[in-house]
Amino acid sequence: MERTEIAVGDSVKLEIYFSTSTYRGTIVKRPKICVDRDSLCRYIELRTNVVAKPDSTYPLVISPYRLMLMKTDSVDITYIEFHISNRSDTSIFIRPIDYPKDYFELLLPPETVPDSSISGHLTLNGLGLQNSFNKSLTFECDDAVQSRFTIPIVRQILGQGEVNAAINLDPECPE
């Protein structure tokens, strides 16, 4: 949370990390949010479908399904390209709906035609260049169910001693 106190009528942005861990299928989590010291608390429900094989999503497939941007003493990855393939038989318009603009800039074509692929480009800026982070990009499709896709984006800044330990961050993640 950006601030610990806010005025009446003001708002504050909350960031909730929804870790899927090793779960598969439909997952429901209910974080509790307390809005004052007098225990006025509410639960919000977050529901998602965790896909075991990222290349089996429909109508779009994202590759790579997670974007890793590392910085070491010798390498600094500040730009990455990703691809979105349309596996449907109709054109799909896509619209980014949430991503941290103070961490990276996004270039993404607004439409993908059937049986083709588009390229998106992400470039770190501001806070993204200075910090390690776990963020994401969520976009929405104009298909019948308004499908939403989220791409995890990870930035790790490693010192020389940490580089060897980070080489195999996730053995199940084909990059």
Image: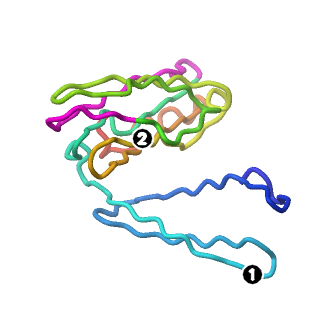
Quarter holding the C terminus is top left
Q: Is 41 inside the magenta-drawn segment?
A: no
Quarter of the image for residue 28 reads bottom left
**Kind of residue at disc 2:** Phe
Q: Is 76 inside the magenta-drawn segment?
A: yes
Which residue is tagged 1? 39
- Position of residue 74 measured from the top left corner of the image (x, y, whole percent): 55, 18
Q: Residue furthest top?
A: 74
Which residue is tagged 2? 139
Q: Which circle, 1 or 2, is nearer the viewer?
A: 2
Quarter of the image for residue 126 reads top right
> Is 175 situated above or below 38?
above
> Is 94 situated above or below 53?
above
Q: Kindly report the distance in space between the C-alpha atoms of the residues bearing marks 1 and 2.
A: 35 Å
Local secondary structure at mark 2: strand
- Position of residue 69 measured from the top left corner of the image (x, y, whole percent): 49, 29
- Position of residue 140 measured from the top left corner of the image (x, y, whole percent): 39, 43
Q: Which portion, as a residue range, is magenta? A: 73-94
Q: Residue at x 32, y 44 (%)?
A: 171
- Position of residue 57 measured from the top left corner of the image (x, y, whole percent): 23, 46
Between 7 and 34, which is closer to the camera in this rendering?
A: 7
